Image (cartoon, rainbow, N blue to C red):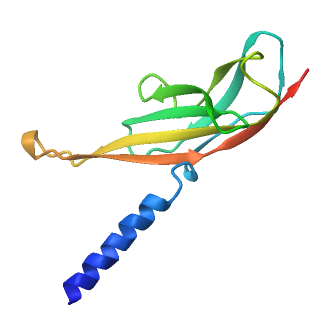
Amino acid sequence: MKHIALIFAVGALLVGALVVPAQAGDIRFGRAWAADKVLREGCHGYRYQYVVRPRTNDWSLETFLHRPSGGILQSGAFAVGADPKRGHDRFRICNDSARPGRYKITGKLTWRRCNDLPGPLMDCHQRVRWIKPGYFRLRRA
């Protein structure tokens, strides 16, 4: 009977973990942000910043720019070796595909942790966490 209760408890924890929104974000793993901006005529790069705190030196970050309606307008990517843990980039936004409103930047941080044992004994696990999202307003000129 104890085994059934244990199985039920573990199952409940797993189901609970699946219900948590993937993009809730956690500042302990980093964040993304941008200042409010003016939507200009044509297509332009609009700067945003990020900082990540991976648990190892083997990491990558995917960023997503969400429209005010919720859909994804653009994405970006950063990786160890090519990009710093703190930096900036630009989303290219065109006024014919965007509208004024409140935009959201989310980021998915992925890293690998290995046990450093030799050869076939080496075991690696991938971890994924969402960083704290940022918001900015895009207004008409």
Q: Where is residue 111 in the image (x, y as percent from the top left)?
A: 38, 41
The residue sitting at the right extreme is 141
The quadrant of the image that shows the C terminus is: top right
Q: How many marks?
A: 0
The residue sitting at the top extreme is 42
Up the image or down, 91 lies above or below 62; here it is above
Q: Residue at x 56, y 48 (%)?
A: 23
Q: Position of residue 22 (x, y in %)?
A: 51, 50
Tell me where residue 44 sits by quadrant: top right
Q: Where is residue 127 in the image (x, y as percent from the top left)?
A: 37, 47
Tell me where residue 114 sits by quadrant: top left
Q: Residue at x 42, y 46 (%)?
A: 128
Q: Position of residue 99 (x, y in %)?
A: 79, 26
Tell me where residue 106 sits by quadrant: top right
The quadrant of the image that shows the N terminus is: bottom left
Up the image or down, 132 lies above or below 72; here it is below
Residue 40 vs residue 47, the one in the foreground:
40
Residue 66 vs residue 54, the one in the foreground:
66
The residue sitting at the left extreme is 120
Q: With 40 as the anchor, is 3 left or right in this view?
A: left
